[in-house]
Image (cartoon, helix red, strand yellow):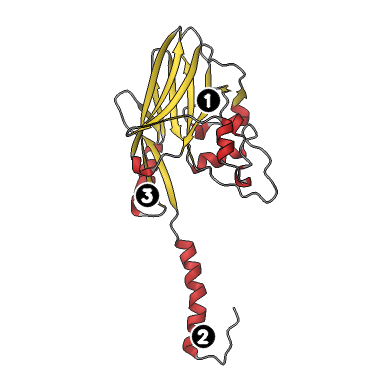
């Protein structure tokens, strides 16, 4: 930056200090992030931070909230991405989504019939791909293939969390509307964004097997954090400790 040497020294100092202060502000700025985690319950195994497993008579279901890092991973997988426009900025969709894996442990096929989230007196059904497309018309979301994301894919080898899956290598597209015995399928279940004021909510997944219906529900908590804040850093340290247990 060029500063006129004829200016008063005090003014020159101010002119130099302002851009430096702005740069430091940008470097230390804390972004707001939404962190959604499964609540501990006697019937839930928390496999990793964010990944929860419920075992039932018919199937094992693993659910985890899709955070910003997982959205970025999904949009880079050939299985789930489209070619965006040249000027498109790739944004994180303003949605509440869950990465769900269903392993059929029964001797007969099972079907995933419906999914809901409930908080307070509110109950919301999962969105279809065309509904999402209607909400997210900006080119900023053109990289995401929501039709593929909401479609089932068969998992070729056992995995316990989304972070361990290579979607192009470890999964194949499934055209079946049911889960065969001993197979595992995964898919995204997507909802309108849950307000942070809700605090806690339930994810309910209805399945049918052998003509019988069962609803499997997970409890989740959601909270906004400022990155690099004390609470956020403490949470990240606890997660790192759990990963090494």
Measured as percent of width and height from the top left, residue 242 is found at 37, 38
Cα separation, mark 2 vs mark 3, equals 39 Å
Measure how far apart labels 1 and 2 are at the Cα level.
Answer: 61 Å
Q: CA distance from mark 3 to mark 1?
A: 29 Å
Q: 206 or 107: nearer the eye?
A: 206
Residue assigned mark 3: 232
Count of labels in the image: 3
Q: Which numbered dot is residue 186?
A: 1
Mark 2 element type:
helix
Residue displayed at 50% across by 35% down = 163
Relative to 173, residue 209 above or below: above
Q: Residue farthest to the right?
A: 86
88 up-or-down from 76: above or below: below
Locate the C terminus and report the quarter of the image it occupies: top left
Whether residues under marks 3 and 1 lie with C-beta atoms below 8 angstroms apart, the answer is no
Q: Are marks 1 and 2 in contact (CB under 8 Å)?
A: no
Residue 123 horizontal/vertical position (percent): 39, 30
Q: Name which of mark 2 and mark 3 comes first in the sequence.
A: 2
Asked which quadrant contains residue 241, the reply is top left
Is residue 53 shown to the viewer in this render?
yes
Location of mark 2 (residue):
12
Where, by quadrant of the figure, is residue 239 drawn?
A: top left
Which is more toward the observer, 47 or 227?
227
In this rendered view, identify the residue nearer to me: 157 or 62.
62
Packing grade of label 2 (10 A; few <14, some 14-19, many >=20) is: some
Q: Nearer the viewer, residue 95 or 27?
A: 95
């Amino acid at each position: 930056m060029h500063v006129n040497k004829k200016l008063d020294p005090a003014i020159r100092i101010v002119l130099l200090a302002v851009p430096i202060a702005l740069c430091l502000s940008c470097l230390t700025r804390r972004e707001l992030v939404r962190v959604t985690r499964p609540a501990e319950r006697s019937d839930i195994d928390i496999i990793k931070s964010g990944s929860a497993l419920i075992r039932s008579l018919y199937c094992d279901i693993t659910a985890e909230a899709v955070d910003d890092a997982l959205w970025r991973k999904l949009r880079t997988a050939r299985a789930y991405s489209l070619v965006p426009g040249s000027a498109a900025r790739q944004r994180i969709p303003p949605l509440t989504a869950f990465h769900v894996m269903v392993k059929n442990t029964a001797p007969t096929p099972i079907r995933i019939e419906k999914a809901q989230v409930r908080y307070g007196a509110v109950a919301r059904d999962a969105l279809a791909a065309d509904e999402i497309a209607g909400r997210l018309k900006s080119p900023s979301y053109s990289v995401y293939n929501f039709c593929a994301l909401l479609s089932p894919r068969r998992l070729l080898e056992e995995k316990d969390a989304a972070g361990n899956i290579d979607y192009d290598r470890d999964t194949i597209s499934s055209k079946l509307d049911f889960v065969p015995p001993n197979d595992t399928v995964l898919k995204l279940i997507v909802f309108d964004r849950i307000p942070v004021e809700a605090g806690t909510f339930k994810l309910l997944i209805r399945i049918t097997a052998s003509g019988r219906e069962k609803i499997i529900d997970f409890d989740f908590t959601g909270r906004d954090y400022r990155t690099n804040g004390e609470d956020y850093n403490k949470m990240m340290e606890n997660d790192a400790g759990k990963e090494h247990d």
